[in-house]
Image (tube, rainbow, N blue to C red):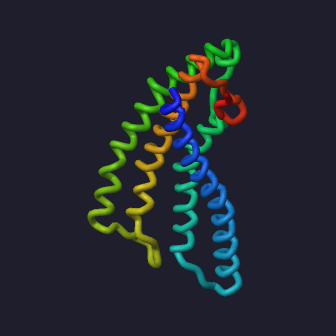
Amino acid sequence: MRPLLAVSNAIDLLNEKIGYVCNLLVLLACLVSAVNAMIRYAFSNSSNGWLELQWYMFAILVMFGASYTFKRNEHVRVEIFYLTLSERGQLWLDMIGTLCFLIPSCLLLAYLSWPFFMQAYSVGEMSGNAGGLIRWPIKFVIPAGFVLLALQGVSEVIKRIAALKGYVTIDAKYERPTQ
């Protein structure tokens, strides 16, 4: 079980670092937005590239932030039924839901979005707007985000199995296994 928990910890660390970057992107997107607005109104000058940069940062924030949010157990959940279960029942429900729904859905969406990225990459897709940015890098964020979320799902399943076997307990606030 220890090797699997080491894999889980590595996935958690990866998504923690990505979450930190996403937190910085919020600040950066606000700064870009504010500076772009000031330049537009003060100097009557602007660029579509700045607007697209904001959209790109938001897309990265959403797609990569999903795995970080899942890791921290701050995702949306309908808890009416969930809260009536015992701790063991909650572990089983989390594990079954992740294995049967989350991981397959994420892998399917990553698989289906890969050609969308590859087509844009192969033609070197650019924005149709004057002064716009290249598009293929942001299209890569879609399959990458779903793969990161699936990986975090794998980490959560490992932690649930370890908790069910009594190796660890799950810290409900941050989903960290404690020994």
Identify which residue is drawn at 28% across, 66% down.
Answer: 123
Up-down relation of residue 57 to residue 44 (above or below): above
Determine the image quadrant of residue 55: bottom right
Residue closer to the observer: 103 or 56: 103
Identify which residue is drawn at 48% across, 44% down.
Answer: 148
Residue 101, x across and y down, in percent: 46, 27
Identify which residue is drawn at 56% across, 44% down.
Answer: 66
Residue 169, x across and y down, in percent: 66, 24
Up-down relation of residue 11 to residue 93 (above or below): below
Residue closer to the observer: 43 or 52: 52
Quarter that holds the C terminus: top right
Q: In this view, does 152 lie to the left or right of 171?
A: left
**Residue lying at the far front of the rendered structure:** 2
Determine the image quadrant of residue 92: top right
- Counting every numbered tag in the picture gives 0
Residue 107, x across and y down, in percent: 39, 38
Up-down relation of residue 130 to residue 68 (above or below): below
Identify which residue is drawn at 63% across, 33% down.
Answer: 76
Determine the image quadrant of residue 73: top right
Residue 136, x across and y down, in percent: 38, 63
